[in-house]
Image (cartoon, rainbow, N blue to C red):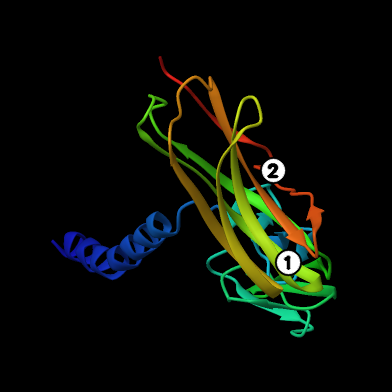
Amino acid sequence: MERRGAREVLLRSFLPALLAVQVGNCRAGPTSPTPPAVGIHLECPPSLLIGQSGVCTATATSATGLTEFLTGLATWSVTPSEVAQSDGFGRVTGRSAGTATVRASYGEKAGAAEVVVKAEDGLVVTIGIAQGSGRVGEPATIGFSGWYAVVSGERGALAVVVRAGDGTLIVTAARDLQRGGGSFGLDASFRMPAGVGRVCGEASLRIDGRLIEPTGPLARPICIDEVR
């Protein structure tokens, strides 16, 4: 009886400690800490016109190659602010000619990129639409949107010109621009003429009678084929 009582005393003394060790080991377990990010990489438009906006993206890459997208989480700034400005979410707008440094930071990591703002006439066409069935007499629309800059003159004339396949003018939609820059959207609406085969529209900018060649992903005619 005395030996059994001694064993019970020993078990009562050591059992809580043993359980604590086992529970602690289970909780700890093997861990794989997330490697720290080695830096923030920025991708920005290499150049902007005065008044034009472009989007920068920020990503962080860990030592193991894991990529985290931080564009919406990072803190953004642009210097000098006279050349470009940021909306705080990665969008940068050109204000005057020069080179601006765009910075993004998140936690202890930061990255930077340069954007050149050009003070020159320009028409950047980014979106084009062509709406219509192509049936004779039915309504149709050809339109474009993007960015413009008028620098060499006090005024500019933006237009969307729609022509038939043989070059015959169908309709022109025009808009006067003041000196400066910004975004634009302009549509030309018409009824599909008969016997033209195809109609095409394109955007143009003239400053003091001089035609400015458009650039951008949609710097080309957009067409609607006639349906017979």
**Residue extending farthest left:** 1
Residue 62 image position (x, y, % from top left): 67, 55
Quadrant in which the N terminus is drawn: bottom left
Q: Is residue 25 left or right of residue 36?
A: left
| Occupied quadrant, residue 69 | bottom right
Name the residue: 21% across, 61% down. Answer: 3
Of the numbered discs in the image, which one, if any, rests on residue 219? 2
Q: Position of residue 109 (x, y in %)?
A: 69, 71
Query: Which residue is at 76% across, 65% downward?
Result: 49
Disc sitting over residue 133 in the figure = none
Residue type at mark 2?
A: Ala
Rendered location of residue 110, percent (x, y): 72, 71
The relative height of residue 162 versus residue 98 in the rendered view (above or below) is above
**Identity of the residue drawn at 66% across and 31% down:** 167
The answer to which image quadrant residue 81 occupies is: bottom right
Q: Residues within 10 Å of mark 2 (few under 14, many from 20)?
A: some
Residue situated in front as seen by the camera: 33 or 37: 37
**5 above or below 137?**
below
Q: Is residue 3 left or right of residue 127?
A: left
Q: Quadrant of the C terminus?
A: top left
Please state which of residues 206 and 104 is positioned toward the viewer in this rendering.
206
- Report the number of numbered marks: 2
Residue 70 in sight from this viewpoint = no
Query: Circle 2 — which element?
Result: loop
Q: Residue at x 71, y 66 (%)?
A: 156
Identity of the amino acid at label 1?
Ala
Whole-number angstrom distance, CA of label 1 to CA of label 2? 15 Å
Q: Is residue 99 above or below residue 192?
A: below
Marker disc for residue 149: 1
Q: Are marks 1 and 2 in contact (CB under 8 Å)?
A: no
Residue 2 position, x and y percent, is 17, 65
Q: Secondary structure at mark 1?
A: strand
